[in-house]
Amino acid sequence: MGAFVNDADEFFAFCTENDVSFVDFRFTDLSGRWRHHTYDVSAIDAARLEEGIPFDASSFPGWQPNFHSDLLLMADVGTAFLDPFTEAPTVNVICDVWDIYKDQPYEKCPRSIGKAAMEHFQAESHGDIAYFGTEKEFFIFENVLIEDDYYHAMFQVDSYEGEWNDKTEYPSGNTAHRPGTKGGYMQVQPVDSLNDLRAEMLTTLRQVGLDAFHHHHEVGQAQVEIGVKHDTLVGAGDIVQIYKYIVKGVAERHGKTATFMPKPLFDDNGSGMHIHQSLWLDGKNLFYDPDSYGQISDTARYYMAGIFAHAATVAAFTNASSNSYKRLTPGYEAPTILTYSAQNRSASIRIPYAAHEDEVRLEIRFPDSSGNPYLTLTALLLAGLDGINNKREPLGPHDEDLFELSPDEIEDRGLPELPDTLKEALQSLKHNHEFLSPVMSEEFITTYRTLKMETQVLPDQARPTPFEFLTTYSA
């Protein structure tokens, strides 16, 4: 991520140069949502930045009790950028959370956990830098209706691109140019109706400091992708948060709505967040070996084996919603079999084609954007390091089209898969989290599990769905 400022002096000079009226302090809660606290710029000085911004943490699920509610926001001024949506000039700054009671980084602050993961990685002498590149797919709709009551539940999304609108009468006429189910990948205009909107999103991402460099229509109807450059773990987490904010804001500015929900449409592809990873030491790519399969080294192979070995637990962070597992079903290009392959998009970990040494990397294809990006990247890194430490060997390579295998074939061949539900992932997190212990405390693990059970699993289990009425009502 490109930084506009490097220290407090440059930060205040940046504010003066841009006639800033407000400073917006942003931080990430356990679920992955951005929260913010805004100050008039005249109320902020170097001492306040150094000492921290106090706030009440008792209203955030899983954080502090009422009798110990005060925490501090510690601004990382290197993340500062001008908000492109506010009427009054506002500079946004991403923060870490500080625990005043223990006088240390807050153990439930996801960004602080990400920083601790990088310190652990470097302390174990596995390298001096770890890169993460996130490919985020998302949908853009014109209208969304939702109702969730004890006697009535429904949702309805709408997009001009939806094939359900083939017979819709529009005031200006119906052009009938639509991608159709699973037909949108890299279509051109007019079938791709979102080109100009994506271009504006990309331009805005660059304006706020992100190195966005390409965009295209994705496979699903109303589904798109904008590419941004890789970064370090914490930097990549920051990018996800800024990316989501910009994409949603630009869509809103045009009267549309963007969502990173993994599976908003039945019978069409869902949205993932493919994560590219590599480890480096002294400028050398530790994942590179020109004489091996896919040009990957033993280190890379051990790393992916660690992710496979702990995949059920890792999924509690990488696929952190009940909806995540509706995407991870056969027929929608979302891999679930825990194996690897070169260039093969049906494997959970793909080795992309690389023309140069610095391009060699692993692409983990099962995660999505519904969770907390710092925790997602941390869980993947720690699982990978466990694989390196124990020299684990992965299943594979498998160069066949794994999407063509039936459930029986997968079972008969003994191919391991991701869990089927978030509940299974959280149960695995309860019993298998020692590899996370260098940076995630027992209290954090328990709090995270409880939060996900109470806000995702149990409410989802308790609700009947229209499909259940169709299949069970007349039983």
Image (cartoon, grey):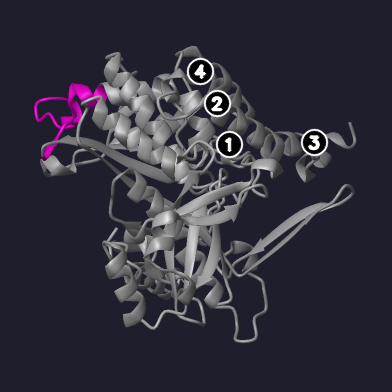
As rendered, which of 176 and 172 lies closer to the eye?
172
| Pointer 1 local density, CA inside 10 Å: few below 14, some 14–19, many at least 20 | many
The amino acid type of the residue labelled 2 equals Pro
Q: Is residue 4 visible?
A: no
Q: Secondary structure at mark 1?
A: helix
Q: Secondary structure at mark 4?
A: loop
Q: CA distance from mark 3 to mark 1?
A: 17 Å
Residue name at image x 49 percent, y 42 percent = 109
The amino acid type of the residue labelled 4 equals Asn
- Position of 105 relative to 384 (above/below): below
For label 3, the residue is: 462
Kindly indicate whether the residue at mark 1 contacts the one at mark 2 (C-beta within 8 angstroms): yes
- Position of 43 relative to 368 (above/below): below
Q: CA distance from mark 4 to mark 3?
A: 27 Å
For label 4, the residue is: 432
Q: Which disc number belongs to residue 325?
A: 1
- Position of 472 relative to 34 (above/below): above
Image check: 193 left or right of 301? right
The amino acid type of the residue labelled 3 equals Ala
**Which numbered disc, 4 or 3, marks the residue closer to the eye?**
4
Q: Secondary structure at mark 3?
A: helix
Q: Is residue 441 visible?
A: yes
